[in-house]
Amino acid sequence: MRISIFGLGYVGTVSLACLARDGHHVIGVDIDASKLAMMRDGCSPIIEIGMRELVAEVVASGRVEVTDDVAAAVHGSELSFVCVGTPARPNGSQDLRALEGLGVQLGQALATKPAPHVIVVRSTVLPGTVDGVFAPLVETHSGRRCGDGFDICFQPEFLREGTSIRDYDAPPLTVIGAESDRPVRQLRELFGKLPCAFVVCGVRTAEMLKYDRCSRRDGSRVHGHATQHFHCISPAGLRVRRVLPAEGLARPVARRCSARRGRPGSRRRPRE
Ligand SMILES: NC(=O)c1ccc[n+]([C@@H]2O[C@H](COP(=O)([O-])OP(=O)(O)OC[C@H]3O[C@@H](n4cnc5c(N)ncnc54)[C@H](O)[C@@H]3O)[C@@H](O)[C@H]2O)c1
């Protein structure tokens, strides 16, 4: 498959190297000229076990290109991974400037691409960001709606620095948040053979799953998570019980959360 990867930071570089290792042709895109130059020379822009050797090998194979030309990368690939940074601001909100800027550029590139294209957002975002922020920018600047020649989906990344190649090859699960078939087909082709469950759900559910794992990694307890789900999912228009079972959390926890959505003090489970 011909794949473009936007953002050659930690996630983008690991994805680029592993996809090229697996035989795909990969175009790496970044706004940082020094990262492009390193990659062109066969050097890894990140420090990670095994990455120096892997980048040298895949660049030598001829399956890796790099560019800062967004339109050329979109036109030269059928699927794009978005791996730009989404750092936290001091007030706890996310800095989405890189994601928003890229949404504009991808939209402009798609405006002149007749062939079908799939955009896979891999950056970590709060639930609702893909549908509420990123997709509208792509639609506005392409002059087309999602589903009309391009699709946008969300695939959370579960890499951990230090073990990223191993995590890429054996993730805890593969989650595809998509509202149409084309992205699921293509991502199943890329990741369907990995030794883990392949979960297909809605975009917002997938965003929530990633958000949950981040907060759990930060030390929250299961019940704390369930409470977060209760608070966070409702504004995003999701149902608690669609997220928790996918993560393997205990059924009673999901039931307790559902119950809390009913009248205060009520023991009756509300309808979903
Ligand atoms: N680092 C991790 O362990 C990890 C794990 C899972 C998920 N994530 C998430 O993945 C995303 C990327 O993380 P990272 O650590 O790789 O970030 P990073 O900051 O290391 O890299 C982001 C890259 O994107 C580039 N960039 C910015 N705007 C661009 C544009 N318009 N076009 C092309 N490139 C652009 C930057 O120059 C930079 O090289 C974040 O949302 C992060 O939360 C990170």
Image: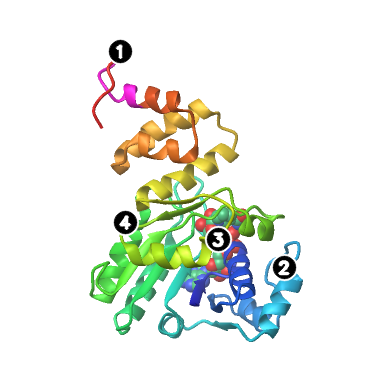
49 lies above or below 252? below
Tell me where residue 230 appears, x and y as whole percent. Answer: 37, 31
Determine which residue is flagged by label 4: 131
Name the mark on residue 265: 1
Q: Are marks 1 and 3 in contact (CB under 8 Å)?
A: no
- Considering only order in the chain, which callout, 3 or 1, is on the residue closer to the N terminus? 3
Q: CA distance from mark 2 to mark 1?
A: 54 Å
Which callout, 2 or 1, points at the residue further toward the start of the chain?
A: 2
Labels 1 and 4 touching (C-beta < 8 A) = no
Disc 1 and disc 3: Cα gap in Å? Answer: 46 Å
Name the residue: 61% across, 79% down: 36
Image position of 235 (left or right of 91): left
Q: Position of residue 171 (x, y in %)?
A: 59, 52
Rendered position, 170 above or below 237: below
Of labels 1 and 4, earlier in sequence is: 4
Query: Is the residue at mark 2 in contact range of ligand 1, meaning its CB lies under 8 Å from it?
Result: no
Query: In the rendered image, is residue 155 in sight?
Result: yes
Near-viewer residue (241 or 229): 241
Write down the quadrant of residue 153 in the picture: bottom left
Q: Residues within 10 Å of mark 2 (few under 14, many from 20)?
A: many
Q: Which residue is mark 2?
A: 51
Mark 2 and 3 residues: CB-CB less than 8 Å, in contact? no
Going by the numbered disc 3, the residue's amino acid type is Lys
Q: Nearer the viewer, residue 213 or 38?
A: 213
**Label 4: few (<14), some or many (≥20) within 10 Å?**
some
Quick check: 236 left or right of 42?
left
Is 198 covered by the magenta stretch?
A: no
Task: Say what secondary structure mark 1 lies in.
Answer: loop
Queried whether the magenta region covers residue 261, the answer comes back as yes
**Picture residue at 35% right of the left edge, 62% below the top:** 134
Give the labeled residue for mark 3.
193
Residue flagged by tag 2: what amino acid is it? Answer: Met
